[in-house]
Amino acid sequence: MFLICMLMPASISILTEKRMEKEKFNNSDLILKYLLYTFLITTIMNTFIFIFSSEKFFYYNESTFNYNSCLKYMWLSLIIAFILPYILKIISANISIDLEIRRTNKNESIKK
């Protein structure tokens, strides 16, 4: 049950992004996007568990992942999985990073 909660929502995110973009991805892009979404969703959900859990240091014990908490975890992670591709698209559309690398010769730096 723990593995389903951790690994399933990323596939929902990829499906949402695929319908949003309407372009074909190659297999390596799909694997990298799946790993990215798995990392992001798991990090967000672990943050929620840590903040709202009564046991701050042992939040991966048996009482945390019983049937009731797994059901809550799964519903919340599915909501995040649907929203996350839209958030990443908005961020990537509005924020761009341009790097310019200049190579100087040693003779030019000595003349200055």
Image: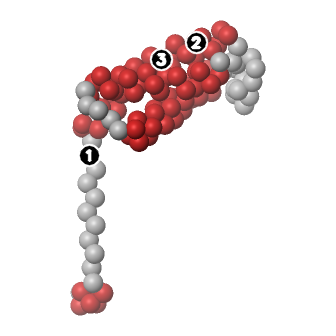
Q: Residue furthest front?
A: 27
Q: Amino acid at mark 2?
A: Lys
- Residue at screen point 33% across, 35% down: 25
Q: Residue 47: image x %, image y %?
A: 57, 29
- In the image, 54 versus 26, the foreground residue is 26
Q: Earlier in the sequence, mark 2 or mark 3?
A: 2
Q: Residue 19: image x %, image y %?
A: 30, 22
Disc 3 marks which residue?
78
Query: On residue 4, which mark appears?
Result: none
Q: Amino acid at mark 1?
A: Ser
- Residue at screen point 24% across, 38% down: 94
Q: Quadrant of residue 31?
A: top left
Q: In this picture, is 52 found above or below 37?
A: above
2 or 3: mark nearer the eye: 3
Crowdedness near tag 3: few (<14), some (14–19) or many (≥20) residues, C-alpha within 10 Å: many
Crowdedness near tag 2: few (<14), some (14–19) or many (≥20) residues, C-alpha within 10 Å: few
What whole-number distance in Å separates the C-alpha atoms at marks 1 and 2?
36 Å
Callout 2: helix, strand or loop?
helix
For residue 55, say whether it is visible. Answer: yes
Q: Residue 50: image x %, image y %?
A: 62, 27
Disc 2 marks which residue?
72
3 or 1: mark nearer the eye: 3
What whole-number distance in Å separates the C-alpha atoms at marks 3 and 1?
28 Å
Callout 1: helix, strand or loop?
loop
Q: In this picture, is 4 found above or below 103?
A: above
Query: On residue 96, which mark appears?
Result: 1
Q: Quadrant of residue 104?
A: bottom left
